Image (spheres, rainbow, N blue to C red):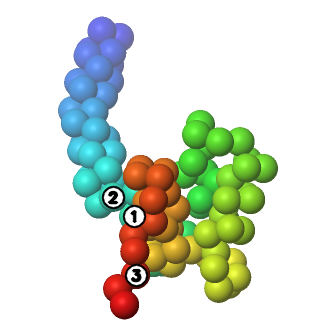
Amino acid sequence: MQKHILIAVTAALLSLPLALNAADEAKKKGPFMAADTNGDGKVSQAEYVAAVKGKMDEKAAAAKFAELDKNKDGSLSREEFAAGEGEKKGGKKKKEAN
């Protein structure tokens, strides 16, 4: 019995760094890649709502998604997503070059 517990604890301890590394990799890739959970290169409304959970409620997240989805295709491109990130961080959007 103790041998089984020791094996289980050892396995858990060995897998912990792998799980933490995966979480760190998602953070390093940035918020867009972290939000794009299925890796299709765009963020769906469901992915966006899940990504901002804890920062705003579902209704507010859905409204923000609709505001950011400028071309109304039902998903956020990297640029559309970044526009929302820029507003949160600096309060100002990047100026377009003329």
> What residue is disc 3 on?
96
Q: Give the position of the N terminus as an image quadrant.
A: top left
Measuring from the top left, give residue 75's x and y in whole percent: 62, 76
The circle drawn on residue 33 is 1
Q: Residue 42: tell me if it is visible.
A: no
Q: Amino acid at mark 3?
A: Glu
- Examine the rendered structure and indicate whether residue 72 appears above or below residue 81: below
Outermost residue to the right? 59
Q: Nearer the viewer, mark 3 or mark 2?
A: 3
Mark pair 3, 2: CA separation = 22 Å
Task: Please tell me which residue is depicted at 25% across the width and 54% down the height of the picture.
Answer: 28
Could you tell me which secondary element the residue under label 2 belongs to? loop
Residue 96 in sight in this render: yes
Q: Which mark is residue 30?
A: 2
Mark 1 residue type: Met
Classify residue 86 as left or right of residue 75.
left
Q: Residue at x 40, y 52 (%)?
A: 90
User: In this figure, what is the number of numbered marks?
Assistant: 3
Q: Position of residue 55 (x, y in %)?
A: 58, 40
Mark 3 vs 1, N-terminal side? 1
- Residue occupying the point 73% across, 49% down: 60
Q: Are marks 2 and 1 in contact (CB under 8 Å)?
A: yes
Measured Cα–Cα span from mark 2 to mark 1: 6 Å
Residue 35 lies left or right of residue 59; in this view the side is left
Depth check: give the residue in front, 9 or 80.
80
Vertical placement of 6 versus 20: above or below? above
- Quadrant of residue 97 within the rendered picture: bottom left
Neighbour tally class for label 2: few under 14, some 14-19, many 20 plus, Cα within 10 Å: few
Q: Tell me which numbered mark, 3 or 2, is placed earlier along the sequence.
A: 2
